[in-house]
Amino acid sequence: MLKILFAEDQPEDNEIATREIRKSGLDFVGRRVDTREDFLAALEAFRPDIVISDYMMPTFDGMQALKLSLEFDPSIPFIVLTGSRNEETAVACMKSGASDYVIKSHINRLPYAIREALERARLSLEGKEALRRLEESEELFRVLFEASPIGKTLTRFDGTIIMANRALAEIIGCTVEELTGTDGGAFIHPEELALRARIIEELLAGRSQSRRVEMRLVRKDGAPVWTDVSTVLVRDREGVPRYLISSLADISGLKREEAQLRALNGELERRIGEKETLLRELFHRTRNNMQVIISLLGWEAELVGSDVVDEFVRKTNDRIMSMSLVHKKLYDSMDLSRIDLNEYCRELIDLLVDSEPGRRRHIRFQPAAEALPVKIDTAVPFGLAFHEIVSNALRHAYPPGAEGEVRVVLSSLAPDRVELAVSDDGVGLPADFDGRSGKTLGFQLIHGLVEGQMGGSFACETGRGLRCIVRFSDAQTQTRV
């Protein structure tokens, strides 16, 4: 509730003022005093929201009361209530700090004066509080601005630096005083001035709220320095652009590391290119040498003129061709460490069919549902084992002139786990056949390749025909290139 302190020596005048105030609808609690001591005590104990004082009293007057009230709390509104019409007195009261001056003959104006004085006091208090918060906010901004480990600038749109912090001064190699009030363009590399102008233009046009770029500055000693710059446009409450705030971090060290890394990458790419060229040339020469070996064996077989030698040479040539195919696939591939097993098996089958004219209809190949890249250390023994298994089915599964089908199925069992199944519907194997200790080189070679070199397993299931199963993991070998 509103509390009014009356400084009045006439109880009748105080009653008239009280009735007039209540008649206006103002609800309040009042207290009357007429001496200096009682006035001071009431200020302390009653804590009034407003003071209404007579101008003239026997031992105390309104000007003294005004001075005491202002000293106690200058925010308390003070109204002088008097019977005098002296304009000089009214002016003196207002100049001394009174909120209003009301003549007793116009007592009906008192409620209006109270409301006006209280409203002005409220607005004044709010303004002071807003100013206090603004000052605190500005102080906090200044502290954060100056204490930031990142370089900071507050600039006008013409580039003039309003504020700069110590971190930026250290980047530029000068003092904060040397930066403040100068044109920031003087510390920007000439080739970056156009970029800076575009950033300001975009921010002012509203095409972006902030911009972050890498920009070169120029130190006081003339040395360039790379910085990561983030710039934002600050507007006032009405949306009018006021200034730019930029944060700058020195990234010169990162730039040097990037340059070194690019140089290392370039050198590495060059060496890899040389290595790939050398390997491709090596593969090419190896295949050519294999062709020479095949030709030499063929000439020797012609000179000997023996069917046994011819058969031996033919089998040897097929084995060499399966190894040569690995080098061909690697030579044609972008990856010098792996080849696709699906494509490799398909081309191996074509080689086998070409060496056995008229038998293409007997082979049906079912590749894996997905690509099966394997390393060269797996592909070479796999190709030799594949050659032995499939050629054995083509040559020995069926009697001369008999029809039949050899089915080749390649599948992935799990990551890095592969299964090759070659089955035929031919005559099968004798009950006492032992592929490990038998006299045939083929099965002994398969066991040695699959189990010895590939670390896999080889098994045969015979009945109506023969089914050979090879399982292995490509994870045991290491990528060479």
Image (tube, rainbow, N blue to C red):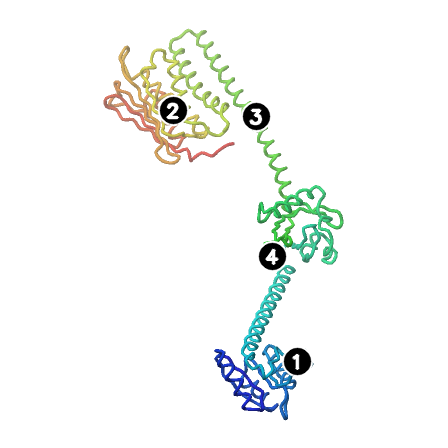
Q: Of helix, strand and loop, which one carries label 2?
A: helix
- Residue at 64% in and 62% down: 142
- Mark 1 or mark 4: name the one nearer the start of the chain: 1
In terms of depth relative to the viewer, which is nearer, 231 or 253? 231
Circle 4 residue? 236
In x, y percent, where is residue 466? 28, 22
Look at label 1 and name its amino acid: Ala
Residue sitting at x 29%, y 23%: 423
Q: Amino acid at mark 4?
A: Asp
**Which residue is disc 3 drawn over?**
277
Q: Secondary structure at mark 1?
A: helix
- Tell me the distance, in whole angstroms, between the alpha carbons under discs 4 and 3: 65 Å
Quadrant assignment, res 302: top left
Verify CB contact (< 8 Å) between mark 1 and mark 3: no
Give the distance between the C-alpha atoms of the residues marked 2 and 1, in whole angstroms: 121 Å
Q: Amino acid at mark 2?
A: Ala
Quadrant of the image occupied by residue 89 = bottom right
Of the image marks 4 and 3, the number of the one nearer the N terminus:
4
| CB-based contact (under 8 Å), mark 1 and mark 4 | no
Which residue is nearer to you in this view: 334 or 137? Answer: 137
In the image, residue 388 lies at what x, y percent? 37, 21
**CA gap, disc 1 to disc 4?**
42 Å
Q: CA distance from mark 4 to mark 2?
A: 82 Å
Q: Which residue is mark 2?
A: 385
